[in-house]
């Protein structure tokens, strides 16, 4: 297996802060590598060194002759924003073969879930997930030898994640990917690099197994360090006693032994086993508890599509502006409820409607809140944080406490004393997330509403947040595209599907949906519409087989576990797909 790229002895600093020292990285043909590390450790910088856009402070890079390398960054280039989707992809084709190879662009767009009527949309009008799919398409269209992905899973819904997983699993080229999505990494990679403590820890296994191996390494290192510390203490104590006795008794032999022991201690000190310092992140949550029988209840209400009406997102049933209908949505103290649904079905709209009603709970009667209910709200865009306020001003604005309490909390959250007057505008996404959790912690709510809380948090932070939410026995309503986070934290599941909010037994059916088509209910007509992106006879036949399988499996369940609404949607889609195939398929 030949080496595509080899980095040896790389050292680099961000200003005066070292990111890594003397690290080695090799990427071979066919490698599927995950690069993992806490926020700010230098992962994106390392990618920039590997692709040659940044030069290292020290070290050398060796690339295979003729290596074709592509990089997929976190954000799309501004130069592409005014292009159409098709043109932005087609311009990646070689100029001398562009017109004869445009069919490649068409096939790739279709396979990535773009409808033909979307090909002429301007890039600036695409959603974040669509732009990510475009960047992926631009990277793979010329069959590179190696692709470097910088957090391609950020802000993606499950549908787009599944599309990415399918393509990465089928790709022949090598790739290295930075991501905080653990399920995604386990699905597409077989080698893991941990960047921490300014070093690289490499394991030839997928993320979850590699993380366990790293944890076992850390435990062994800590034990070895403890034994070494005890040995050092004994040596130094012995050297001290011998030196004292040599002085008291004027015994040069004892004095020489004492010096020999001191040199042994110095060597042991220099060779002590390294123990990681961790990320320094503290996401401990202090929440209050309620003995009430229910925390919140919504009965027989409709949630409006954004921009309709003057009732903060809620109308009485039957409105043609309805986005989500709710028969009965009950949150009890201690519930950890996950709100499931693909992008655009109304999850965030529902949460914003709940928050608007909570803020006006003395005047509204559409949502019932327990009088003891105190909500701590984490919104995915972090709009509660005022950009031109400093971190201290933010805590003064949103919390009750003293200056000393605020500064102590910021230090606990990992912010140096000298940085407390930094404005929110200059903070990274991860730093803003930490600040928002500080606000929640200081206010000690008894009901947490978390809208995509993992968006700006690294893997270590996500795992710590999971542990804290479980340990706090908090009442939670949350949304997240992180499947591992939902599976770990949630104990009840509510899905928005076909304009209805329904409780489901588990999220597996939602995860299993392939995302290439979705059947929705029109709020105006109540009829089902198939959102397509299936082109070509082979794709149609595959989808028909899949739908028939889903119907057969659901009908084989006991009646109380069947999903009549979903069966009706699948049957309707089967009819439409059969019409597309035409009479020749009889």
Image: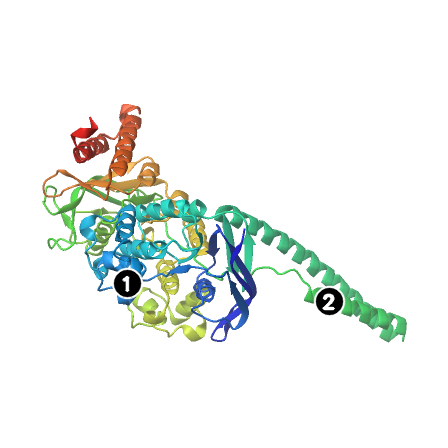
Q: Residues within 10 Å of mark 2 (few under 14, many from 20)?
A: few
Mark before the other along the chain sequence, 1 or 2:
2
In percent of width and height, residue 81 lies at 24, 64
Q: Residues within 10 Å of mark 1 (few under 14, many from 20)?
A: few
Q: Mark 1: which secondary structure?
A: loop
Q: Mark 2: which secondary structure?
A: helix
Between circles 1 and 2, the one closer to the viewer is: 2
Quarter of the image where the C terminus is located? top left
In percent of width and height, residue 40 lies at 44, 65
Q: Quadrant of residue 262?
A: bottom right
In percent of width and height, residue 118 lies at 20, 52
- Check the image and report above or below for 173 versus 13: above
In percent of width and height, residue 363 lies at 15, 54
Q: Which residue is mark 2?
A: 267
Q: What sort of colour scheme is used for the picture?
A: rainbow
Q: Is residue 435 visible?
A: yes
Q: Is residue 330 left or right of residue 239?
A: left
**Residue 369 - label:** none
Q: Which residue is mark 1?
A: 384
Tell me the distance, in whole angstroms, between the alpha carbons under discs 1 and 2.
53 Å
Q: Quadrant of residue 419?
A: bottom left
């Amino acid at each position: 297996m030949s080496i595509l790229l080899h980095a040896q002895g790389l050292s680099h600093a961000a200003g005066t802060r070292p990111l890594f020292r003397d690290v080695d990285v090799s990427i071979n043909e066919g490698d599927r590598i995950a690069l993992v590390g806490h926020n700010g450790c230098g992962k994106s910088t390392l990618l920039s060194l590997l692709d040659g856009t940044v030069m290292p402070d020290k070290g050398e890079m060796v690339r295979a002759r003729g290596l074709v390398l592509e990089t997929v960054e976190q954000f799309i280039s501004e130069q592409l924003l005014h292009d159409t989707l098709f043109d932005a992809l087609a311009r990646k084709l070689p100029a001398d073969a562009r017109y004869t190879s445009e069919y490649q662009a068409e096939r790739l767009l279709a396979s990535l879930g773009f409808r033909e009527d979307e090909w002429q949309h301007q890039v600036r009008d695409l959603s974040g997930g669509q732009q990510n799919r475009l960047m992926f398409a631009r990277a793979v269209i010329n069959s590179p030898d190696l692709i470097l992905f910088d957090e391609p899973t950020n802000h993606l819904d499950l549908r787009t994640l599944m599309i990415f997983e399918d393509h990465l699993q089928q790709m022949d080229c090598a790739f290295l990917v930075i991501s905080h999505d653990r399920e995604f990494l386990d699905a597409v990679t077989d080698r893991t690099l941990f960047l921490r403590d300014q070093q690289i820890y490499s394991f030839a296994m997928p993320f979850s197994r590699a993380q366990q191996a790293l944890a076992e390494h850390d435990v062994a290192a800590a034990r070895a360090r403890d034994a070494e510390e005890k040995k050092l203490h004994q040596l130094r104590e012995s050297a001290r006693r011998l030196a004292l006795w040599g002085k008291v008794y004027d015994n040069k032999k004892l004095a020489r032994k004492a010096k020999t022991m001191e040199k042994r201690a110095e060597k042991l000190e220099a060779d002590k086993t390294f123990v990681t310092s961790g990320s320094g992140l503290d996401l401990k949550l202090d929440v209050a508890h309620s003995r009430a029988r229910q925390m919140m209840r919504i009965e027989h209400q409709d949630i409006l599509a954004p921009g309709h009406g003057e009732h903060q997102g809620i109308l009485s049933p039957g409105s043609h502006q309805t986005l989500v209908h709710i028969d009965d949505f009950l949150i009890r103290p201690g519930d950890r409820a996950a709100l499931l649904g693909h992008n655009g079905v109304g999850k965030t709209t529902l949460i914003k409607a709940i928050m608007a009603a909570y803020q006006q709970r003395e005047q509204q009667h559409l949502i019932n809140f327990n009088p003891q209910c105190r909500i701590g709200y984490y919104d995915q865009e972090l709009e509660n944080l005022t950009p031109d306020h400093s971190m201290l001003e933010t805590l003064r604005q949103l919390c009750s406490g003293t200056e000393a309490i605020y500064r102590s909390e910021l230090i606990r959250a990992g912010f140096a004393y000298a940085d407390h007057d930094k404005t929110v505008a200059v903070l990274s996404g991860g730093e803003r997330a930490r600040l928002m959790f500080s606000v929640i912690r200081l206010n000690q709510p008894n009901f947490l509403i978390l809208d995509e809380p993992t968006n700006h948090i690294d893997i270590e932070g996500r795992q710590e947040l999971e542990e804290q939410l479980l340990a706090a026995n908090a009442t939670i309503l949350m949304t997240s595209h992180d499947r591992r986070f939902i599976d770990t934290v949630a104990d009840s599941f509510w899905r928005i599907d076909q304009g209805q909010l329904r409780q489901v037994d588990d999220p597996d059916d939602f995860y299993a949906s392939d995302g290439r088509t979705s059947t929705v209910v029109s709020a105006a007509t109540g009829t089902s519409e198939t959102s397509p992106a299936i082109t070509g006879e082979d794709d149609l036949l595959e989808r028909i087989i899949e739908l028939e399988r889903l119907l057969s499996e659901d009908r084989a369940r006991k009646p109380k576990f069947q999903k009549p609404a979903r069966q009706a949607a699948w049957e309707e889609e089967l009819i439409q797909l059969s019409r597309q195939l035409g009479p020749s398929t009889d």
